Image: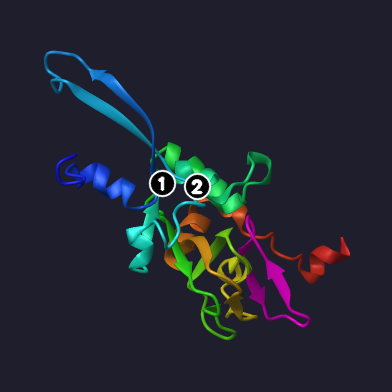
Amino acid sequence: QVATHKIIDPVANFHLQNGAQVESVNFHADTADRGVSFGVMINYKYSMHLATDNTSISYQRDSTIAVSPSVVPLLINMSPSHHHPFLQAIQDLDHNKKHDIHVLATQFAKGTTILRRGQLPDAVYFICLGQVRVDTVPSSILAQGQSFGDAEVVNGEPVRFSVVAMSVCHVLFVRHKDMVTLLDLVPSLRPAAPPTRMDSRL
């Protein structure tokens, strides 16, 4: 609204205050008699590079937001050939509407310990922006497109090495309970069982 310089449409207000950009405006979106008279359709574009603590109200409040599986490849910026098998499986299940598994997004401030050695794993994390340090000996660095927490969740083990954000770090994550559901629905995601002593002799 020009007079007050305020966004009066709640949908537009939500998108524009959470890092979206207007990609295109279709002024002829609905011309049917039963449609919205003189309505317009607005397409919004999201980029993880824009959804930062400077542009996103959700991130300013340190909120966790849900992410549609269909937009996960855009946020994590991975090619289909390098897509993580867990995320790919969630997308495949989502197409068939056969699950209630949620992909979530949040950010961690520099210096935050995301996972602490010895704790029970709470999620599998996928890095969209930023870097984390894994306190192995010597320590290792994980960056965009990489994940952590996978082995602990899949194997049901405590966290082996602490993971600390080296910068503001934007991540997608799937909670432990949803990962258990995913592994039950897609057993092939579990590692193959090691051969028994009898099998190893054959």
Q: Residue at x 84, y 65 (%)?
A: 200
In the rendered view, does 11 fall on the left or right side of 193? Answer: left
Measured from the top left, where is residue 42 in percent x and y? Answer: 31, 31
Please, what is the three-letter code of the amino acid marked with disc 2? Answer: Val
Q: Please tell me how crowded label 2 is: few (under 14), some (14-19), or many (20+) other residues with Cα within 10 Å.
A: many
Q: Residue at x 53, y 44 (%)?
A: 74
Can you see residue 93? no
Q: Quadrant of the N terminus?
A: top left
Which sits in the foreground, 89 or 146?
146
The residue that disc 2 covers is 72
The magenta stretch is 132-147
Q: Secondary structure at mark 2?
A: helix
Question: Marks 1 and 2, Cα distance to the nearest angstrom?
Answer: 7 Å
**Which residue ends up furthest to the bottom in the rendered image?**
118
Q: Is label 1 in contact with label 2 (beta carbons under 8 Å)?
A: yes
Q: Residue at x 63, y 55 (%)?
A: 145
Q: Residue at x 44, y 63 (%)?
A: 106
Measured from the top left, where is residue 101 in percent x and y? Answer: 41, 54
Please, what is the three-letter code of the amino acid marked with disc 1? Answer: Ser
Q: Is residue 181 above or below residue 114?
A: above
Q: Which mark is residue 49?
A: none
Q: Please tell me how crowded label 1 is: few (under 14), some (14-19), or many (20+) other residues with Cα within 10 Å.
A: few
Measured from the top left, where is residue 80 in percent x and y? Answer: 63, 40
Measured from the top left, where is residue 153 in percent x and y? Answer: 55, 69
Can you see residue 169? yes
Q: Quadrant of the C terminus?
A: bottom right
Q: Is residue 22 above or below residue 6?
A: above
Examine the structure image and report whether residue 141 is included in the region drawn in magenta.
Answer: yes
The residue that disc 1 covers is 68
